[in-house]
Image (cartoon, helix red, strand yellow):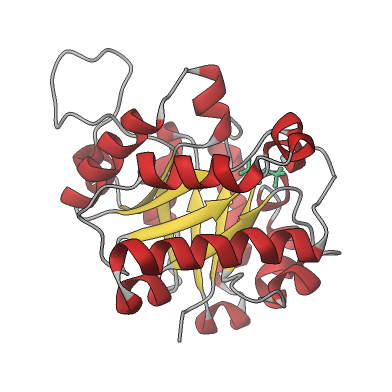
Amino acid sequence: MRQKLAAGNWKMNGTAAALAEVDALNSHSSIAAVDVVICPPATLLSRMSERLTHSSIETGGQDCHPAASGAHTGDVSAAMLVDAGAAYVILGHSERREDHGETSALVCAKAGAAMNAGLTAIICVGESETQRDDGTTLTVIEDQLAGSIPDVVTARNLVIAYEPIWAIGTGRVPTLSQIEEVHDFIRTNLITRFGEKTGAATRILYGGSVKPSNAAEIFHVVNVDGALVGGASLKANDFSAIITAL
Ligand code: PEP
Protein backbone atom coordinates (compact mmCIF):
# COMPACT_ATOMS: atom_id res chain seq x y z
CA MET A 1 0.00 0.00 0.00
CA ARG A 2 1.52 3.31 -1.07
CA GLN A 3 1.11 6.22 1.35
CA LYS A 4 -0.46 9.19 -0.46
CA LEU A 5 1.72 12.29 -0.79
CA ALA A 6 0.89 15.95 -1.33
CA ALA A 7 3.94 18.00 -2.29
CA GLY A 8 3.81 21.79 -2.45
CA ASN A 9 6.26 23.63 -4.70
CA TRP A 10 6.41 27.29 -3.70
CA LYS A 11 8.86 28.02 -6.53
CA MET A 12 10.39 31.54 -6.20
CA ASN A 13 7.58 32.80 -3.97
CA GLY A 14 7.52 33.83 -0.34
CA THR A 15 9.43 35.78 2.24
CA ALA A 16 9.22 35.41 6.03
CA ALA A 17 5.61 36.62 6.16
CA ALA A 18 4.51 33.62 4.09
CA LEU A 19 5.55 31.26 6.89
CA ALA A 20 2.27 32.09 8.63
CA GLU A 21 0.61 29.77 6.06
CA VAL A 22 2.21 26.73 7.69
CA ASP A 23 0.58 27.44 11.05
CA ALA A 24 -2.82 26.53 9.59
CA LEU A 25 -1.40 23.28 8.22
CA ASN A 26 0.06 22.33 11.61
CA SER A 27 -3.43 22.00 13.03
CA HIS A 28 -4.98 20.28 9.99
CA SER A 29 -6.45 16.98 11.21
CA SER A 30 -6.68 14.89 7.99
CA ILE A 31 -2.95 15.33 7.38
CA ALA A 32 -2.19 12.51 9.81
CA ALA A 33 -3.35 9.91 7.25
CA VAL A 34 -1.11 11.10 4.42
CA ASP A 35 2.37 12.49 3.81
CA VAL A 36 2.80 16.19 3.11
CA VAL A 37 5.93 18.05 2.02
CA ILE A 38 6.37 21.74 1.34
CA CYS A 39 9.28 22.91 -0.77
CA PRO A 40 9.83 26.63 -0.13
CA PRO A 41 12.61 28.77 -1.58
CA ALA A 42 16.00 27.88 -0.05
CA THR A 43 15.96 31.10 1.99
CA LEU A 44 12.93 29.86 3.98
CA LEU A 45 13.80 26.20 4.29
CA SER A 46 15.36 26.18 7.72
CA ARG A 47 12.80 28.53 9.25
CA MET A 48 9.93 26.55 7.75
CA SER A 49 11.40 23.26 9.02
CA GLU A 50 11.47 24.71 12.54
CA ARG A 51 7.96 26.13 12.32
CA LEU A 52 6.27 22.93 11.09
CA THR A 53 5.24 20.97 14.16
CA HIS A 54 2.92 18.40 12.52
CA SER A 55 4.68 15.03 12.40
CA SER A 56 3.32 14.20 8.91
CA ILE A 57 4.54 17.43 7.28
CA GLU A 58 8.11 17.66 6.06
CA THR A 59 10.07 20.15 4.01
CA GLY A 60 12.03 19.84 0.82
CA GLY A 61 14.35 21.75 -1.46
CA GLN A 62 13.60 22.70 -5.05
CA ASP A 63 17.00 21.73 -6.43
CA CYS A 64 20.49 20.67 -5.32
CA HIS A 65 23.97 20.50 -6.81
CA PRO A 66 25.47 17.07 -7.58
CA ALA A 67 28.67 17.88 -5.67
CA ALA A 68 28.91 17.70 -1.88
CA SER A 69 30.63 21.09 -1.55
CA GLY A 70 33.03 23.38 -3.37
CA ALA A 71 33.33 26.30 -5.76
CA HIS A 72 29.76 26.45 -7.07
CA THR A 73 28.53 29.99 -6.45
CA GLY A 74 24.83 30.22 -5.82
CA ASP A 75 24.27 26.47 -5.52
CA VAL A 76 23.10 24.39 -2.58
CA SER A 77 24.24 20.83 -1.86
CA ALA A 78 22.03 17.94 -0.78
CA ALA A 79 23.76 17.85 2.62
CA MET A 80 22.92 21.55 3.09
CA LEU A 81 19.25 20.80 2.44
CA VAL A 82 19.37 18.04 5.06
CA ASP A 83 21.09 20.44 7.45
CA ALA A 84 18.21 22.90 6.89
CA GLY A 85 15.70 20.21 7.87
CA ALA A 86 14.67 18.91 4.43
CA ALA A 87 13.61 15.32 3.80
CA TYR A 88 12.86 15.71 0.07
CA VAL A 89 14.16 17.58 -2.96
CA ILE A 90 12.40 18.32 -6.25
CA LEU A 91 14.71 17.58 -9.19
CA GLY A 92 14.35 18.02 -12.93
CA HIS A 93 11.34 20.33 -12.74
CA SER A 94 10.54 21.50 -16.27
CA GLU A 95 11.28 25.09 -15.23
CA ARG A 96 14.83 24.04 -14.34
CA ARG A 97 15.18 21.86 -17.43
CA GLU A 98 14.08 24.86 -19.54
CA ASP A 99 15.43 27.90 -17.64
CA HIS A 100 18.76 26.33 -16.71
CA GLY A 101 19.24 23.87 -19.55
CA GLU A 102 19.27 20.90 -17.18
CA THR A 103 19.71 17.59 -18.98
CA SER A 104 18.47 14.26 -17.70
CA ALA A 105 22.11 13.29 -17.07
CA LEU A 106 22.49 16.26 -14.71
CA VAL A 107 19.19 15.46 -13.00
CA CYS A 108 20.45 11.90 -12.52
CA ALA A 109 23.68 13.12 -10.92
CA LYS A 110 21.73 15.43 -8.62
CA ALA A 111 19.35 12.60 -7.67
CA GLY A 112 22.29 10.33 -6.84
CA ALA A 113 23.73 13.04 -4.56
CA ALA A 114 20.34 13.63 -2.95
CA MET A 115 19.78 9.93 -2.24
CA ASN A 116 23.31 9.61 -0.93
CA ALA A 117 22.57 12.40 1.54
CA GLY A 118 19.41 10.64 2.73
CA LEU A 119 16.88 12.74 0.82
CA THR A 120 13.91 11.45 -1.16
CA ALA A 121 14.19 12.78 -4.73
CA ILE A 122 10.99 13.89 -6.45
CA ILE A 123 12.06 13.54 -10.07
CA CYS A 124 9.84 15.40 -12.55
CA VAL A 125 9.09 14.22 -16.08
CA GLY A 126 6.63 15.53 -18.62
CA GLU A 127 6.02 16.37 -22.25
CA SER A 128 5.63 19.73 -23.97
CA GLU A 129 2.45 20.59 -25.81
CA THR A 130 4.17 19.98 -29.17
CA GLN A 131 5.31 16.54 -28.05
CA ARG A 132 1.77 15.72 -26.87
CA ASP A 133 0.38 16.86 -30.24
CA ASP A 134 3.04 14.89 -32.11
CA GLY A 135 2.09 11.71 -30.26
CA THR A 136 5.56 11.32 -28.71
CA THR A 137 4.54 11.73 -25.06
CA LEU A 138 5.40 8.19 -23.95
CA THR A 139 8.73 8.19 -25.77
CA VAL A 140 9.66 11.49 -24.10
CA ILE A 141 8.69 10.13 -20.68
CA GLU A 142 10.59 6.90 -21.31
CA ASP A 143 13.76 8.82 -22.22
CA GLN A 144 13.45 11.12 -19.21
CA LEU A 145 12.93 8.18 -16.83
CA ALA A 146 15.87 6.26 -18.32
CA GLY A 147 18.17 9.29 -18.13
CA SER A 148 17.12 10.94 -14.87
CA ILE A 149 16.85 8.09 -12.35
CA PRO A 150 20.07 6.73 -10.84
CA ASP A 151 20.50 3.03 -10.08
CA VAL A 152 20.67 3.55 -6.30
CA VAL A 153 16.90 3.60 -5.97
CA THR A 154 14.75 2.19 -3.20
CA ALA A 155 10.99 2.60 -2.86
CA ARG A 156 11.63 5.15 -0.12
CA ASN A 157 14.10 7.49 -1.78
CA LEU A 158 12.32 8.04 -5.09
CA VAL A 159 9.06 9.74 -6.07
CA ILE A 160 8.18 10.42 -9.70
CA ALA A 161 6.09 13.46 -10.61
CA TYR A 162 4.37 13.39 -13.99
CA GLU A 163 3.98 17.03 -14.97
CA PRO A 164 2.87 17.81 -18.52
CA ILE A 165 4.61 21.14 -19.22
CA TRP A 166 1.51 22.55 -20.92
CA ALA A 167 -0.53 21.97 -17.74
CA ILE A 168 1.81 23.78 -15.33
CA GLY A 169 0.36 27.08 -14.18
CA THR A 170 -2.05 27.22 -17.13
CA GLY A 171 -5.30 25.96 -15.62
CA ARG A 172 -5.31 23.23 -18.28
CA VAL A 173 -5.35 19.60 -17.13
CA PRO A 174 -5.06 16.40 -19.20
CA THR A 175 -8.10 14.15 -19.37
CA LEU A 176 -8.26 11.50 -16.67
CA SER A 177 -7.55 8.82 -19.26
CA GLN A 178 -4.46 10.71 -20.47
CA ILE A 179 -3.22 10.90 -16.85
CA GLU A 180 -3.97 7.20 -16.35
CA GLU A 181 -2.13 6.21 -19.52
CA VAL A 182 1.08 8.00 -18.51
CA HIS A 183 0.95 6.86 -14.85
CA ASP A 184 0.44 3.23 -15.98
CA PHE A 185 3.37 3.62 -18.33
CA ILE A 186 5.59 5.00 -15.56
CA ARG A 187 4.55 2.20 -13.17
CA THR A 188 5.40 -0.48 -15.74
CA ASN A 189 8.69 1.23 -16.51
CA LEU A 190 9.67 1.33 -12.81
CA ILE A 191 8.75 -2.33 -12.28
CA THR A 192 10.71 -3.37 -15.37
CA ARG A 193 13.81 -1.48 -14.26
CA PHE A 194 13.76 -1.86 -10.47
CA GLY A 195 11.70 -5.03 -9.95
CA GLU A 196 8.19 -5.62 -8.69
CA LYS A 197 8.81 -4.71 -5.05
CA THR A 198 10.45 -1.32 -5.60
CA GLY A 199 8.54 -0.45 -8.77
CA ALA A 200 5.15 -1.15 -7.23
CA ALA A 201 5.97 0.73 -4.02
CA THR A 202 7.31 3.93 -5.63
CA ARG A 203 4.90 6.84 -5.51
CA ILE A 204 3.89 8.58 -8.73
CA LEU A 205 2.45 12.08 -8.37
CA TYR A 206 0.48 14.05 -10.91
CA GLY A 207 1.35 17.77 -11.24
CA GLY A 208 -0.10 20.56 -13.35
CA SER A 209 -2.93 22.93 -12.32
CA VAL A 210 -4.16 20.75 -9.45
CA LYS A 211 -6.74 22.73 -7.47
CA PRO A 212 -9.30 21.99 -4.75
CA SER A 213 -11.95 21.71 -7.49
CA ASN A 214 -10.21 18.98 -9.54
CA ALA A 215 -8.07 17.18 -6.94
CA ALA A 216 -10.54 14.44 -5.94
CA GLU A 217 -11.17 13.17 -9.47
CA ILE A 218 -7.46 13.16 -10.28
CA PHE A 219 -6.67 11.25 -7.06
CA HIS A 220 -9.14 8.53 -8.07
CA VAL A 221 -7.10 7.69 -11.16
CA VAL A 222 -5.23 4.38 -10.86
CA ASN A 223 -1.53 4.84 -10.04
CA VAL A 224 -1.97 8.47 -9.00
CA ASP A 225 -0.46 8.51 -5.51
CA GLY A 226 -0.82 12.22 -4.85
CA ALA A 227 0.10 15.53 -6.38
CA LEU A 228 2.90 18.01 -6.89
CA VAL A 229 1.14 21.34 -6.47
CA GLY A 230 2.49 24.74 -7.47
CA GLY A 231 0.22 27.78 -7.25
CA ALA A 232 -2.43 26.14 -5.07
CA SER A 233 0.15 25.21 -2.42
CA LEU A 234 0.86 28.83 -1.56
CA LYS A 235 -2.32 29.35 0.44
CA ALA A 236 -3.00 26.98 3.34
CA ASN A 237 -6.75 26.91 2.60
CA ASP A 238 -6.27 25.65 -0.95
CA PHE A 239 -3.48 23.24 -0.08
CA SER A 240 -5.50 21.88 2.87
CA ALA A 241 -8.47 21.22 0.59
CA ILE A 242 -6.22 19.29 -1.81
CA ILE A 243 -4.75 17.29 1.08
CA THR A 244 -8.25 16.45 2.30
CA ALA A 245 -9.12 15.13 -1.17
CA LEU A 246 -6.21 12.65 -1.10
C1 PEP B 1 4.52 22.81 -10.59
O1 PEP B 1 5.15 23.80 -10.88
O2 PEP B 1 5.12 21.81 -10.19
C2 PEP B 1 3.07 22.85 -10.73
C3 PEP B 1 2.45 21.72 -10.78
O3 PEP B 1 2.50 24.10 -10.81
P1 PEP B 1 0.92 24.43 -10.82
O4 PEP B 1 0.26 23.54 -9.79
O5 PEP B 1 0.83 25.88 -10.48
O6 PEP B 1 0.42 24.11 -12.19
Q: Give residue 195's position: percent from left, percent from top.
A: 30, 72
Comparing 75 with 158, the one in front is 158
- The percent coordinates of residue 208 (x first, y second) are 71, 48
Point out the quarter of the image occupied by ligand 1: top right
Q: Is residue 163 in view? A: no
Q: Position of residue 194 (x, y in %)?
A: 29, 65
In this view, the residue in front, 176 or 184, is 184
Tell me where residue 65 sits by quadrant: top left
* Displayed quadrant of residue 217: bottom right
Picture layout, residue 224 above or below residue 59? below
Nearer the observer, 237 or 5: 5
User: Would residue 180 be seen by someone viewing this image from the given angle?
Assistant: yes
Q: Residue at x 14, y 32 (%)?
A: 68
Point out residue 14 in the picture as x, y percentages from the top left corner: 59, 35
Q: Specify whether 242 is left or right of 71.
A: right
The residue positioned 19% from the left and 41% from the top of the image is 79
Can you say which quadrant of the picture contains the C terminus?
A: bottom right
Quarter of the image for the N terminus: give it.
bottom left
